[in-house]
Image (tube, coloured by chain):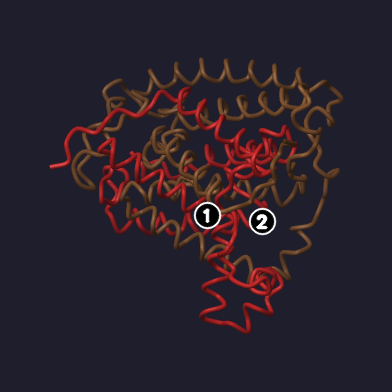
Chain colours: A brown, B red
């Protein structure tokens, strides 16, 4: 049996999606308040979950290559288009802070009964329609500044992948420590009872407000 | 009437499970997880229903229409699974609530207006970037792709900056 299987069938897709959804919901990512609290420094779950997942998957892929289970570069590696990805990433960050979700978490918000997630999804379809409508004008920006095809950090820096992985682990440990420190300081992280209690507009006072300024300094 | 919701998982446990699911996705399909691709397919499907000629002629959406049913594809089945998994999780943990969730001082109308505006930015941005937090941030970075890390830096920087301006909407 050679890996990857390159199986794009319905049932594996559905099953992997179910597990993806369970992990996101379990992390609390069906709640826009918990998600956006990442950017007020009160809740570092977004950073912690993402970084843990990236390190686990990256280490697993690296091990699979080292052990000869998968051929090198046999999985899809996106190519950098510096302007489009930088600007698009910034728009997604801004839209996340304003709208409360990203595309994947809006699906989980919808599955958690949040009307605002449904409205966010309608907005996403409108945003994609605006992009398509203006694509002729956007096209130069879309294709500008292409990087080498499927370039990875180890190729860019000329370092072994293991060094990159260890650097990511160090960054994660530092980030988790700092994040947990800030969470305590700002009265986080946000628990499930805080975001589910009452109806809209009737939330309990935020614990952080009792400890003086919420504004990060 | 709802009962006490179960606490969220430890973020490191959720991250571990997510990482294993992502790894399994790579080994099964040869690519990672995604989400925003569905918004493009949904736009193509709605477009070919409302404005069939303009959508078929559109430089960006035309390819989806030409290939037949624009919604039929791996990413659609996966996101259907995400909704199903989210539903199983929220219902069994008693975290499901039919409500508009926003800051204490935000009226539901204002919250929904923000949700729509944020959705437009994200929908546009994901088409421009060729992916979103899942496809580029999570899956791209797991392959150590430079593109994934450029995305993450831009995403977090813009998120923190924007939150400084609109903090009142969430507190």
What secondary structure is marked by label 2?
helix
Mark 1 — on which chain does it sit?
B
Q: Is residue B41 above or below residue A37?
A: below
Toward the viewer: A112 or B147? A112
Quadrant assignment, res A207: top left
Residue A6 in the image, given as x and y percentages of width and height: 69, 46
Label 2 marks which chain's residue? B
Instruction: Please check whether the numbered discs 2 and 1 fall on a single chain.
Output: yes
- Residue placed farthest to the left in the image? B1
If you read the primary sequence from the N terminus, does the residue marked by circle 2 or circle 1 appear first?
Answer: 1
Which image quarter is the N terminus of chain B in? top left
Q: Residue at x 28, y 44 (%)?
A: B96
Mark number, residue B20: none
Q: Residues within 10 Å of mark 2 (few under 14, many from 20)?
A: many
Q: CA distance from mark 2 to mark 1?
A: 23 Å
**A69 to the left or right of B9:** right
Could you tell me residue B2's position as x and y percent? 17, 41
Evaluate if marks 2 and 1 touch, with contact meaning CB atoms under 8 Å apart.
no
Residue B103 percent location from the top left of the image: 31, 43
Which residue is found at the position 34% from the left and 53% from the top? B111
| Front position in the image: A144 or A148 | A148
Q: Nearer the viewer, residue B171 or A190?
A: A190
Q: Nearer the viewer, mark 2 or mark 1?
A: 1
Q: Which residue is mark 1?
A: B77
* Disc on res. B128: 2
């Amino acid at each position: 049996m050679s890996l990857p299987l390159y199986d794009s069938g319905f049932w594996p897709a559905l099953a992997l999606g179910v597990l993806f959804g369970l992990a996101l919901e379990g992390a609390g990512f069906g709640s826009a308040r918990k998600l956006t609290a990442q950017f007020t420094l009160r809740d570092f779950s977004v950073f912690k979950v993402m970084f843990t997942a990236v390190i686990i998957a990256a280490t697993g892929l690296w091990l699979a290559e080292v052990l000869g289970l998968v051929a090198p570069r046999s999985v899809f590696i996106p190519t950098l288009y510096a302007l489009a990805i930088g600007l698009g990433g910034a728009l997604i960050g801004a839209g996340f802070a304003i709208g409360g979700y990203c595309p994947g978490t809006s699906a989980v918000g919808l599955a958690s009964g949040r009307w605002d997630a449904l409205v966010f999804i309608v907005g996403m379809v409108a945003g994609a329609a605006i992009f398509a409508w203006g694509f002729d004008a956007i096209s130069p920006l879309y294709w500008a500044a292409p990087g080498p095809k499927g370039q990875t950090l180890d190729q860019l820096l000329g370092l072994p992948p293991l060094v990159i992985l260890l650097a990511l682990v160090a960054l994660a440990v530092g980030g988790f420590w700092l994040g947990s420190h800030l969470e305590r300081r700002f009265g986080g992280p946000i628990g499930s009872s805080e975001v589910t209690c009452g109806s809209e507009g009737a939330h309990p006072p935020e614990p952080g407000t009792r400890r003086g300024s919420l504004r990060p300094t | 009437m709802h009962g006490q919701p179960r606490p969220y998982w430890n973020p490191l446990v959720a991250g571990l499970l997510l990482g294993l699911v992502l790894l399994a996705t790579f080994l099964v399909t040869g690519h990672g997880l995604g989400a925003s691709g569905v918004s493009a397919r949904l736009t193509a499907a709605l477009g070919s229903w409302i404005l069939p000629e303009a959508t078929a002629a559109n430089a960006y959406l035309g390819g989806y229409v030409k290939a037949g049913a624009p919604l039929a594809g791996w990413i659609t089945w996966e996101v259907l699974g995400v909704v199903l998994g989210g539903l199983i999780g929220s219902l069994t943990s008693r975290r499901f609530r039919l409500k508009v969730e926003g800051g204490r001082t935000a009226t539901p109308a204002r919250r929904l207006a923000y949700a729509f505006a944020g959705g437009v930015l994200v929908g546009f941005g994901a088409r421009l970037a060729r992916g979103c937090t899942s496809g580029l941030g999570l899956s791209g970075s797991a392959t150590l792709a430079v593109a994934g890390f450029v995305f993450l830096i831009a995403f977090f920087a813009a998120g923190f900056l924007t939150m400084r301006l609109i903090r009142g909407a969430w507190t």
